[in-house]
Image (tube, rainbow, N blue to C red):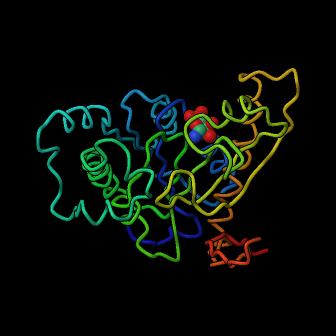
Amino acid sequence: MGLKMMGSKIRIGVLVSGGGSNLQAIIDACEKERIDGEVVFVGSDNPVAGGLSRARKHHIPTWAVDYQGIMAKGMRSPNGPELPAEADIEAVFAKLDPVQQKAPKAKKQLSCRIAFEAAALKMMQETPFDLLVLAGFMRLLSPFFIDAVNQHKSLPRIMNIHPALLPSFPGTDGYGDTLAYGCKVAGCTVHFVDYGEDTGPIIGQRAFAVTPADTIETVRKKGLELEWQLYPECIQLFAQKRLQLIRQKANEHSGRSKRRTVVTITP
Ligand code: GRF
């Protein structure tokens, strides 16, 4: 999994769990040269994900690792799943954010997630890539997987799209949570993946007005249409090497200062 570029095109790996409309937008943008890149594989935690069929139609190699099967088997077994020798469960656990550490059966859950991730990484080894794009991939990735992909800390290379204006409404139902809260603006966010849930440095966002006539269906439809524009644009910024991470200091009202890693986009 080196960082070697193929000509001027980046090699993009995509992970999906569902229908894959974002995947389709990315494939189309590559074909129309709105992204200087090529999708080199599509992987899934769900063997029947619609995104896998979309990929096959474009002759893109696919694979699936059955997340639910691995979790069920691992949680049933008294000693948890068998893990690869390089997986140091205590070290990975220490890197989890406190919310995940406090979840019930957190360590056993983590070892099952690592078993899934090790199998996924094995599949990914077959196809070198420069950027890994999560496109409706509905599983939290642990530090074991993230560190294996991000070999250089200064150059993260896992991106995600989230259906809300982060940092509001992380989690699995961004549009639903936005509407239920009574927000007058909704939107989507593309960010690099870090150890938290939807907490990584923000690359791009798009917003739209929520009107009294909106329902969850119309909000999702409007949001998805913006996602299909935003994701390819952010991937193209990566392909053009225009994304940089900086440590930024912000002063809080309390007078204390807080540091955060943010993305800057070079013109
Ligand atoms: C999108 O709304 C994305 O933001 C969220 O899951 C949905 C996936 O849709 N993470 P699709 O599979 O790309 O159609």
Q: Position of residue 243 (x, y in %)?
A: 66, 71
Residue 23 visible, this angle: no
Q: Residue at x 46, y 60 (%)?
A: 195
Q: Residue at x 52, y 38 (%)?
A: 58
Q: Where is residue 3, by image quadrant?
A: bottom left
Q: Is residue 159 left or right of residue 129?
A: right
Q: Position of residue 189 (x, y in %)?
A: 68, 50
Q: Quadrant location of the N terminus?
A: bottom left
**Residue 15 in view, yes or no:** yes
Q: Position of residue 63 (x, y in %)?
A: 35, 41
Name the residue furthest left: 78
263 or 240: nearer the viewer: 263
Q: Give the mark count.
A: 0
Residue nearest the observer in this picture, 152 or 101: 101
Rendered position, 225 above or below 100 = above
- Most foreground residue, 103 or 211: 103
Q: Position of residue 121 (x, y in %)?
A: 32, 55
* Residue 138 placement, left or right of 75: right
**252 with respect to 68 (left or right):** right
Q: Quadrant of residue 84?
A: bottom left
Quadrant, the C terminus: bottom right
Task: Say above or below: 64 vs 206.
Answer: above
The image quadrant in which ligand 1 is located: top right
Q: Residue furthest front?
A: 254
Q: Residue at x 45, y 34 (%)?
A: 52
Residue at figure coordinates x 53%, y 52% from the top left: 133
